[in-house]
Amino acid sequence: MSSSNTGTSRRSFIGAAALALAAPAILRQTKRATAAEGAFLGASEPPFRRFQFGKFEITVLSDGGAMVDGPWPIVGEDRPKEEVAKLMRDNLLPEAKFRPGFSPAVVNTGKEMILIDTGNGAGGFIPRPAAGRLRESLAAASIKPEQIDIVAITHCHVDHIGGVSEAGVPVFPNARYAVGQEEYDFWSKEERLAGPPDQNEYKSGKMFRDVMLPLVERTFFLKSGQDVASGIAAFAAPGHTPGHLGFHIESNGKRLLAWGDCAHHEVASLAHPEWSALFDMDKAQGVATRRKVYEMAATERLPILGYHTSFPSLGMVERSGTAYRWLPITYQFED
């Protein structure tokens, strides 16, 4: 072999070796470039969570939601804004924003399908497309609106009855409606429409007339202790509204508490049940009800469906000093 050929071969070998050594880095750069060029897919949120509870099957449904200003003054309207912000900061949460849950639930007893609350609909607290997505979540959970036998309402604010009908047509064509007698009587009065149209009472009163009054012949009225269906009993939880109800759901020795709007924030409401809640119609009664319900939940170690706590709005309550703490459900319902 000539010296020139030997030099060429040596240079070729060195060049090839350098390329081989550089190849992983080149590939990594290529992969990074490809990944960086990929379109973001957007946030993804589960539309439902289903679990077995005794002999019942419970499906918690997301009606959607959005970040809103708060929790002050929605919780703690009687406290300095900075005090509520500090509580959020101490709990590693944004100081002036939160994302309330809106979580209706279907209880399948094996004989009947009972829907508890109906979300925002087209005109609720959070506008579409962010919320008002109950029908989409039902479809994702393979539940048809015509399968619902009873719609049980905790209270008649817009974010609980908004999904009852759509453009004047009942969403649940075969359902009967269970509402507290006191709640129904309160919202039936003309004076509910006496206030400013931008206020919560007027909005709820107007929606009640639009979606609930037309269904009066399909409605039955509840008092505390009465059954919605076998295994589901109402209990009085007034203050937020005069006839606000919660529901005990009991099967095979297990009991779950659906407490409606007994909490608007999973930290602030429980850490300070004495703080005034903006949307409570009777502030003092709201405080008394929160204390009573939280103590029952903690003492009896009841799982909770919290509606406005973060989806899937399932948790338990423990005492924390003189107040309480929300413990989100993890694997408690798994056998």
Image (cartoon, rainbow, N blue to C red):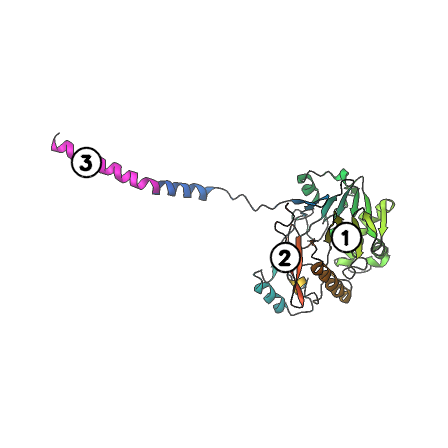
Q: Which residue is mark 2?
A: 327
Residue nearest the observer in this picture, 101 or 335: 335
Picture coordinates of residue 124, whole percent (x, y): 72, 51
Coordinates of residue 273 in the picture (x, y in percent): 70, 65
Q: Which comes before the other along the chain, label 3 or label 2?
A: 3
Q: Quadrant of residue 335?
A: top right
Amino acid identity at mark 1: Phe
CB within 8 Å, label 3 to label 2: no
Residue position marked by numbered label 3 in the rendering: 10
Give residue 212's position: percent from left, percent from top. 82, 48
* Spatial separation of the CA atoms under disc 1 and disc 2: 20 Å
Q: Please give the range of residues in magenta.
A: 1-24
Q: Is residue 267 above or below residue 166?
A: below
Q: Depth check: give the residue in front, 226 or 29.
A: 226
> Closer to the camera: disc 3 or disc 2?
2
Res. 166 in view:
no
Residue at image mark 1: 247
* Amino acid at the residue labelled 2: Leu
Find residue 177 and report its horizontal and vertical position in percent.
82, 46
Question: Which label lies toward us, 3 or 1?
Answer: 1
Q: Residues within 10 Å of mark 1 (few under 14, many from 20)?
A: many
